Image (cartoon, grey):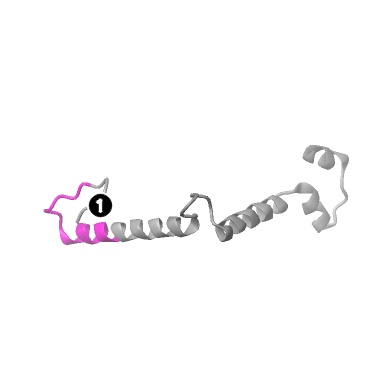
Amino acid sequence: MQIPGLDIPGHLNTDHRLIAGFLCSYQNDLALIHENAHDKLTGLLNRKTSDDRFISIFLKSRNSDPVLNRLRAREPLSLTALSSTA
């Protein structure tokens, strides 16, 4: 069994061969995921992957906004909170 970048001598025991087989399978799965997430012609993220990443970034930034967090908690806003976000 040959895995690029991994030297596997022929005398390894069965456990090592099994682990190497799982690693090879995992490497193939990662390659398929990468291939399906990118456009074949341009190499850019496809529409679904791009939208998912945008939504994830938007939600993370929304949850870390101190002004929105205080509004959600119905706490009074201070001038220091407003000036630190600008």
Q: Residues within 10 Å of mark 1 (few under 14, many from 20)?
A: few
Residue 12 in percent (x, y) is at: 15, 54
Task: Report the residue at 25% width, 47% height from top.
Answer: 6
Asked whether, in this view, residue 47 is left or right of residue 13, the answer is: right
Q: Secondary structure at mark 1?
A: loop
Give the percent coordinates (x, y) of residue 10.
12, 53
Q: What residue lies at 87% left-to-right and 43% top-to-bottom?
A: 78
Q: Quadrant of the C terminus?
A: top right
Which of the pair 76/4 is nearer the observer? Answer: 4
When asked about the image quadrant of residue 59, the answer is: bottom right
Name the residue: 15% across, 58% down: 13
- In this picture, residue 31 sits left or right of residue 38: left
Magenta residue check for 76: no
In magenta segment, residue 8 = yes
Q: Position of residue 80 (x, y in %)?
A: 84, 38
Name the side, left or right, on which 38 lies relative to 1.
Answer: right
Q: Amino acid at mark 1?
A: Ile
Q: Is residue 80 above or below residue 68?
A: above
Nearer the observer, 6 or 49: 49
Residue farthest to the front?
41
Residue at 31 percent across and 61 percent down: it is 25
Which is nearer the eye, 12 or 42?
Answer: 42
Q: Which residues are magenta?
A: 7-22
Q: Nearer the viewer, residue 42 or 83?
A: 42
Tag 1 residue: 3
Looking at the picture, does residue 72 appear above or below residue 5?
below
Q: Is residue 36 left or right of residue 70?
A: left
Mark count: 1
Q: Quadrant of the N terminus?
A: bottom left
Q: Position of residue 63 (x, y in %)?
A: 70, 53
